[in-house]
Image (spheres, coloured by chain):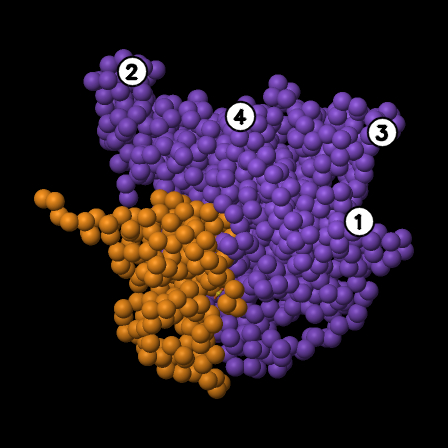
Amino acid sequence: MAIPEQESAANGTGPALSHAGVGTAAWVGRDIPRKDADRFVLGHIDYTADMIAPGTLRVAIVRSSHAHARIGRIDTAAASAAPGVVAVFTGADVRACSAPMPTRVPRERFPGPVDIWCLAADEVLYVGQPIAAVVATSLNDAEAAKSLVEIDYDMLEPVLDAAAALAPGGALARADWPTNVVARDTIRQGDLDRAFQAAFRTVGGEISFGSGTSAPMEPRCYIADWDDRASHLTLHGTLQQPHPTRWMLAQVLGLREAQIRVVAPPAGGTFGLKMVGHPEEALVAILSRELKRPVAFLESREECFLANAREQTHRFEIAADAQGRIIAFRNTIVADVGAIGAGGGWVMAMVTPTVFPTVYDVPNVAVDAVAVTTNKPPWQGIRGYGKETANLVMERAVELIAVELGMSSIEVRRRNLLPKQAFPHRLPSGLNLDSGDYAPALDQLLDLFPLDEWRQRQQDADSNDKRIGIGFAFDLTPEGASFPGSMQAGFETSTVTVDPTGTVRVATSVTSPGGGNETGIAQIVADVFGLLPDDVTIIQGDTDITPFGTGNTSSRSLMFGGAAAVLAARELKSRVAACAATLLQAEPGELVFAQGRICVDADADRSVPFKQAVSTIYTHAYSIAADIELPLQVIKTYRSPNIRHVPDEFGRISAYPSFPYSVHAAAIEIDVATAQVRVLDYAAIHDCGVVVNPGLVEGQFRGAVAMGIGAALWEELLYDESGATRTNRFKSYVLPRAPDLPRIRMGHRVTPSPFQPLGTKGAGESGFGGAMSVITNAIADALGEHGRHVNRVPFKPDRLLPLLAGALS
Amino acid sequence: MSRPSIDLALRLDHRDVVAHVDGRALLIEAIRDLGARSARIGCLTGDCGACTVLLDGQPVKSCLVLAAAADGREVVTLEGSASAIAETVRRAFIAKKGFQCGYCTSGMILVAIDLLEAFATPTEADIRSAISGNLCRCTGYDDIVSAIADAAEQLSAKAATRESPEIF
Ligand code: FES
Ligand code: FES
């Protein structure tokens, strides 16, 4: 496939997309097509479910129908005798042949024991928790036999919301814990009481968030194949984190890592859902070893909606002086993180408090956060990872104080945004903001978004029929999560090899959720060697051939995996340069690598093909290349210099190195009779530092915005009074469809991160919180005076109707 | 072990195939078992469109059709879809980055081809409405819409060239 020559169509980028320090930037900044693009459009990509070989046993999972109970007798006799059924496993069977799943957060940090088995062994903690596995020769047979498994339950009192979890003397969500409180955080900066007393204006509010889920189009799937003769397990799966999954399996199965190969085939979207720690990852492995046959689990869409996240309430207060300077902000957060499983999804609740006060320079800040466990499904990672709720609350607070001050909220933002020269900037939580250029981004947005026109249309609209609302919001998305004590702590590793024909291979620990990071990594490595991205092959997601690392979380692929690849490539380049210098009778320092050749800087006629220099090293290892270190393979780990796990003087660490931001504007219209919301216009400016592939970054940003609009307007997991998920299909958990969304217009700013070798920041997750926030602000704006009462996201019609009634009366 | 099973004969991606399938099987399950893996399973409830195939030339969600109902009929998946329009749509999806993870792409491309076969100059609203039965969680749809619009433009341009009189 030919690579189109056109430059980026990105707005406001121009030459700023080039970068320093890598050599000639022929490919970084170019909007080139995805690697393997042909295979995608021909339907030739095989996802995990496509790899279920004929003869593989299939698992159907019998799940708890109660939110909290002790499991009594389980009768599997009838199910075992059903057609096609090979075996039925219970928690007791699993206990007899494996060990508990290790938790993403070290177990000592929990207030009570956390023995997590892939099938509940004793106490069930949520509706939908796996209790028994029916294994059959076909999925239909396994499913059909599920209803034959009989389970006796001894009911325990369920804890179904945060208020019940915190009620003194109330029920416990885990019978063996002394408390429902999983974690707390207290963040302090300055003197809050004094600031609030001295304030010219103060205002407070409450905002709660419904539960949401990422719902990628590809459901989860795991295929385990135990080779009994070799005592070796291969697991293929929808896995964002193959190495942590291998670590988990090694402990569950009591195997050495070398006995386990974990492969993550191309992923059909993840958005956090497919992080390590789902019970079925361990379950299929155990079943395959016990049954000595390959076993596959394919999640149904209904099961996919068991992934819970985000439910939380904020009570905040903000104070400003007479000049519109925000002088204080305080907030109390209570998050209902559901049951605790092996995964780390609930950690999102502890990320939220660390993001305040986002992009604003606020001297006095207090945030208190508590995460409580309840008898709802465990939180699973979801785009935003807790940062989205912090941004939304901050953006609401800014709007509310602007009303009190009688100023436009745009002006209040301007007066309080951190200025470019204030970076690096320490947030009260200890996070160290790398760089930013916020106010000019707002100016750029106002060029893209016709504010006056929309204000006019708003005035002209008949407010008893349709109401137009206009919103603005900033979004700060800390990226590159690197948590101490977590497996693993946040470094990434890449192995770069220059093969004998002069092509390049990068095996990297970062995986791809499907967003195209392999193309970006190929671009930056191609630039180091002066080759084409097509000359660079990226290998991901196979623990036998990719080095150890986190995988795909927190927009880390280019930031960490790409950086490691560049460091390794530079070292290899210097080896190839040494050989070329001999061939060209020049000094290595005089050589330039470009367009597949190595030439003497001052004398372009003196050059040698890259291929030839490489071939010489391989074929003249005892003569011309005798001094060049072999193999032509270098492995490098990248650790960010902007991570600090040693507490500072305030006892705080900094677990995120990179801070992309964006600013959003939207115009929405509410139909007064039906409370349906339409998004009429949307514009945003995004800054993730140096952009490697504008098309990829823009595509992911637009995807994040679409998801944020969905989370603000339509998407909510609802539970009935027994704790069962009511929203278990796309008809009840409503994702945005193409006609629901306007075209999302976007522009870039490029404020390189001084801490990252290429100047890039995380991209991919960024924008989600801004979209949630801007829609919320636009809805509040449409409600006029009554907008201050907006207190719950998402704005489904049943919640919006009473607000509209208030606005009309 | 008595399970209802049926014999199925159909034309799948221009090949005649016969299979012995579970009577409960859905068309999507049967064709995937027959190797047509580009049709994806996203929900099995008719909501996502990942399983879209052409059944006797019409796009259908193959999770809403029993395999038995396809007996004697013709099924074309993305892999079997080949025409000038199909080729143009594919190129446009690449050029405009009309996919990220690609899981929705089989359905999106088949629906786009169907739209452009029926209708050479769709508006943006037409395109959005045509793909409204297909969910994409990655792109926010803009790049898919751009890809389809781009394909429409290229096809119209080609048609115009064909219709214009030969000068040489
Ligand atoms: S799998 Fe058929 S519509 Fe989703
Ligand atoms: S590209 Fe991933 S679902 Fe559409």
> Gap between marks 1 and 3, in whole Å?
29 Å
State the image coordinates of residue A175 (x, y, percent, origin top left): 80, 60
Q: Relative to A267, does residue A20 appear above or below in the rendering?
A: above
Which residue is nearer to you in this view: A351 or A61?
A: A351
Q: Amino acid at mark 1?
A: Val
Query: Are discs 4 and 1 located on one and the same chain?
Result: yes
Dot label at residue A196: 3
Q: Chain letter of disc 2? A: A
Q: Is mark 4 within 8 Å of ligand 2?
A: no
Residue drawn at the location 84% of the way across and 59% of the way down: A171
Q: Nearer the viewer, mark 4 or mark 2?
A: 4
Chain B appears what colour? orange
The residue wearing badge 2 is A601
The N terminus of chain A sits in image quarter: top left
Residue drawn at the location 39% of the way across and 60% of the way down: B111
Are the residues tagged 2 and 3 within 8 Å (C-beta)? no
> Gap between marks 1 and 2, in whole Å?
64 Å
Query: Are discs 2 and 3 located on one and the same chain?
Result: yes
Q: Amino acid at mark 3?
A: Phe
Chain A appears what colour? purple
Say whether disc 2 or disc 3 marks the residue closer to the N-terminus: 3
Residue drawn at the location 60% of the way across and 79% of the way down: A79
**Farthest-out residue, right:** A169
Q: Chain letter of disc 3? A: A
Q: Chain letter of disc 1? A: A
Q: Nearer the viewer, mark 2 or mark 3?
A: 3
> Gap between marks 4 and 1, in whole Å?
40 Å
Say whether disc 1 or disc 2 marks the residue closer to the N-terminus: 1
Say whether disc 4 or disc 1 marks the residue closer to the N-terminus: 1
Are the residues tagged 1 and 2 within 8 Å (C-beta)? no
